[in-house]
Image (cartoon, rainbow, N blue to C red):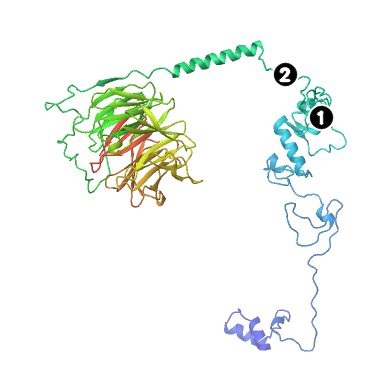
Amino acid sequence: MAAAASSLVSYGSDSDSENESESRSVPQKADPDAVAHLQPLKSGGITTLAALNSAPEVAVKEGVETGVHLDPALKEVVYNPSYETLFAPEFGPVNPFRTQQMAAPRNMLSGYAEPAHVNDFMFEQQRRTFSTFGYALDPSVDSSSQVTTNTYIGAVDEAEKNKGQTVFETGPKKNEKRKKLKGGEASEIDEFLGPWAKFQDEKDVAKPSEEEQKELDEITAKRQKRGRNEEEAPAEEKTILHIKDAYDYQGRSYLHIPQDVGVNLRSSEAPDKCYLPKKQLHVWSGHTKGVSAIRLFPASGHLLLSCSMDCKIKLWEVYNERRCVRTFIGHSKAVRDVCFNNTGTQFLSAAYDRYIKLWDTETGKCIAPFTNRKVPYCVKFNPDEDKQSLFVAGMSDKKIVQWDIRSGEVVQEYDRHLGAVNTITFVDENRRFVSTSDDKSLRVWEWDIPVDFKYIAEPSMHSMPAVTLSPNGKWLACQSMDNQILIFGAQNRFRLNKKKIFKGHMVAGYACQVGFSPDMSYVVSGDADGKLNIWDWKTTKLYHRIKAHDKVCISALWHPHETSKVITCGWDGQIKLWD
């Protein structure tokens, strides 16, 4: 071992032979400390380790505080700190970036809420007083000792004026009761008044003073004037023919169904397959204000009748030159609805001047006016061949009124709705009709029986101001004011078809008329943005949307003999044909 140590010490010396010989001749002693770690431990001896103090006590200067400091933002402490620890002052520099609101003492996110113990009645009393009079007691001030101006918040002047009265405290109580006349003795039957005696200051006759009399006279005069205006005769009717020849070389009028348009307009068959309209074909312009309704000529659809807010009704050609054929003038206010009879030779118009007028489609003459001093909102001929002289109108006074054209008199009134009647639709082979109203209900009536046999109203239902019967007569499409089209069965049960709800358009507030394609594959409707929306009937998907009008697109009709022709009208005064 000693040899190994000596060799380590001599490591690195020159390996020349002379050096070697020198080293051999003179042996050098190794430093015992240098090789101490290589020596084996001596047995039997006890080695002691010196103890180190890692945190020696240091003399504290007077200004430095000792003790544990808690973060003031801490919400929970996991040991029991002493009182001094909890209430020690905060240490460290102030955050220079805190806003005034953040730096202020807060016990909730928005500020400092002072605890105030107020029972519910007192709180409600002060809240109501504040909302009514504009002042309330300050909850942070102890007002039990003495009420001063400092104890009120809000309109302090008002509080002083009202002597701090709350809403539940009325003014000074009057103890004086009104005195009654003395009633005499109970034994005298004729003289005795008892509890029925009048008050001493009671007036028997309420005669108006001179000023009141003047006011009353003015009001009655105004009313009489207004009444006179209403009793005025209906506006004068006239008509303008816009085409050169009312009759062709064979003596046929424009009511004759054309046969040279590429489609058989006389057939009762619907087209086999319908397609989506893509482009605009034609614009009929002539109305100076918004168009409120359009109706196609019955069966053939070769003429189009439109009524407008400019008080005029116009008849247009759908085919060939698409001219305006005739204008019917006879209403003094906006025309709301029009309706052809079965043959198309006559039509009814309902307007806001409270008149319903019957017109001859060919000559333009007004055959008869009808009125019951109420505004008609919708008008419909009875579609039965033997009842073509009868028509019904939904009025603003919640009634459905039935007139006879021959006598000009009201023959029946259906008075069950609770709001103005918006639509009337005949169903079930014209034995019944369905009406909708502002009362958000749908009622079904037997013809000529003034009691509804079915009443449909759900809390979730909205008003439905436009209703259309499907071409197959099985469904009623109702434009609901919650921006969807609801489908009701039109045979016997009148149940809502929950699987067929058409959404995706904005119509709230507008009675946009719904239309069906003749093969029942599409549903069309305008909307409040002037767009024409087309849905697939089977899947209820919104297939197509066309920007049709600048203002509300109020009606959309699919031509009954065409595969893809849709007619729309809007409040911009235009009627458009799409294909």
Give the crowd class for mark 1: few <14, some 14-19, many >=20 residues within 10 Å.
few
Q: Residue 203: which disc?
A: 2
Q: Which circle marks residue 149 in the picture?
A: 1
Quadrant where the N terminus lies?
Answer: bottom right
Q: Amino acid at mark 1?
A: Thr
Residue 483 in view: no
Number of callouts in the render? 2
**Which tag, 2 or 1, sits closer to the chain's start?**
1
Q: Is residue 250 above or below residue 452?
A: above
Which quadrant of the view contains residue 144? top right
Helix, strand or loop at label 2? It is loop
In the rendered image, residue 42, in percent from the top left (x then y), is placed at 76, 87
The residue depicted at 79 percent of the width and 39 percent of the height is 140
| Residue type highlighted by circle 2 | Lys
- Percent from the top left, x then y, of residue 194? 80, 27
Is residue 170 visible to the viewer in this orientation of the structure?
Answer: yes
Give x and y (percent) for residue 477: 37, 44
* Residue 192 location, quadrant: top right
